Image: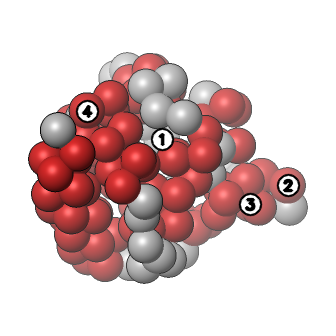
Amino acid sequence: MVALLSSTIAASMIIAAGKFAIPSKPEPGFYKTIEQCSMKISDQCGRTIVKAVLEDRDISKQCCVELVHSMGKLCHDDFLRFYVSLPELGVDATHVYTRGIQVWNTCVQEAASNT
């Protein structure tokens, strides 16, 4: 769990500031699933994807390929739910889900053009 959180810039800043409180689990095994998903993608692309979703940043073709082919849609959706579940991030759930769908759709197109 610590490795996952440290791979996200926003969550890392909250942890460093000592403000992080683990929310109640949305469902049994959710955090284990998140941890397993985080191991399917490089730290660099994990950070890039977080920025793409939370800060409306661009995402590289390579990170799109990792997102689509290594991590997959279920993990991507679980991460969106994870970010929304952290009140300390102060994110707008509608924005996170909308932007998450946009990032996924962009990455599917990018990954398809890579093959």
Residue at image position (22%, 56%) is 110
Label 2 crowd (10 A; few <14 / some 14-19 / many >=20) = few
Does any portion of residue 97 appear in the rendered image? no
Dot in front, 1 or 3: 3
Mark 1 lies on a secondary structure that is loop
The tag earlier along the polypeptide, 1 or 3, is 3
Between the C-alphas of marks 4 and 3, the distance is 30 Å
**Residue type indicated by callout 4:** His
**Which residue is label 4 attached to?**
69
Mark 3 lies on a secondary structure that is helix
Between the C-alphas of marks 4 and 1, the distance is 30 Å
**Which residue is label 3 attached to?**
14
Disc 1 and disc 3 in contact, CB within 8 angstroms: no
The tag earlier along the polypeptide, 1 or 2, is 2
| Residue 24's disc number | 1
The tag earlier along the polypeptide, 4 or 1, is 1
Mark 2 lies on a secondary structure that is helix
| 78 on left or right of 12 | left
Q: Split into 4 quadrants, where in the image is the N terminus?
A: top right
**Residue type indicated by callout 3:** Ile
Between the C-alphas of marks 1 and 3, the distance is 17 Å
| Residue 16's disc number | 2
Q: Residue 40 appears at what percent x and percent y?
A: 43, 25
Dot in front, 4 or 3: 4
| 55 on left or right of 64 | right
**Residue type indicated by callout 2:** Ala
Label 3 crowd (10 A; few <14 / some 14-19 / many >=20) = some
**Residue type indicated by callout 1:** Ser
Between the C-alphas of marks 1 and 2, the distance is 21 Å
The tag earlier along the polypeptide, 2 or 4, is 2
